[in-house]
Image (cartoon, rainbow, N blue to C red):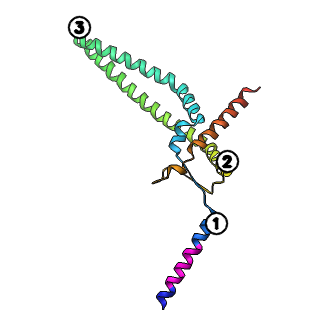
Amino acid sequence: MRRYAHIVSVLIFSFAFSATVDAQQLRIGYVDMKEVLDNAPQVIAGRDKLDQEFRSRNNAIEMDELRAEALESRQQQADMNSDNTLQLEREIRELRRNISRRREDLRDELSFRRTEEVQRLEGEINLAVQEIALRNGFDLIISSPVVYASPELDITELILEQLEVEYAADQLELATP
């Protein structure tokens, strides 16, 4: 008898739950944040800004690499006395160390600035997601990483379109005196 009551209560609960879900029609969307962070115009503009900011330092490092290669080429010609050869080896070694240190510093600083830029844009991206959710009647938006999301749930393109509209409006606002 107890078992019968338990089965009946489980069935009643199941019917009640399914009726609630049917009545509500829960709308869920999925956003691929990697795609957003790769393709949003705000992110692309930020990347271009960082490229310009760090370009001169990178160019200086590349020039030193060319200088080191020229010195190594000169060293291989072996038409110098031993004192000059030792001096040249020291110069090359010091230059290579300097290049390596500067490249590592540049990489660290660039990584830090990229992270800073993405964090600055997170709020803007979240607002775009919320606006799309409200405009299109979504009850829940999840973002990557997820184990699986059906392609029918993917609203990444809507988010990118919204971000493009906002970016264009921001650019127009900046251009207007």
Horizontal side, residue 163 vs residue 14: left or right: right
Circle nearer the viewer, 3 or 1:
1
**SS for tag 2?**
helix
Rendering coords of residue 141 (x, y %): 58, 53
| Mark 3 / mark 1, whichever is N-terminal | 1
> Which residue carries the number 1 mark?
23
In the rendered image of this protein, does residue 107 appear above or below residue 129?
A: above
Rendering coords of residue 88 (x, y %): 30, 15
**Within-10-Å neighbours for mark 2: few <14, some 14–19, many 20+:** some
Residue 12 position by quadrant:
bottom right
* Residue drawn 49% across the image and 36% down it: 111
In the rendered image of this protein, does residue 164 appear above or below residue 6?
A: above
**SS for tag 3?**
loop
Q: Cβ–Cβ below 8 Å for labels 2 and 1? A: no
Q: Is residue 81 magenta?
A: no
Nearest the viewer among 54 and 152 is 152
Horizontal side, residue 96 vs residue 156: left or right: left
Q: Which mark is residue 79?
A: 3
Q: Which mark is residue 161?
A: none
Q: Disc 2 versus disc 1: distance between alpha carbons?
A: 24 Å
Q: Cβ–Cβ below 8 Å for labels 3 and 1? A: no
Nearest the viewer among 166 and 21 is 21
In magenta, the rendered stretch is 6-16
* Residue drawn 49% across the image and 83% down it: 7
**SS for tag 1?**
helix
Q: Disc 2 versus disc 3: distance between alpha carbons?
A: 72 Å
Residue 13 position by quadrant:
bottom right
Rendering coords of residue 118 (x, y %): 56, 40
Q: Amino acid at mark 3?
A: Asp
Nearest the viewer among 96 and 139 is 139
| Mark 2 / mark 3, whichever is N-terminal | 3
Circle nearer the viewer, 2 or 1:
1
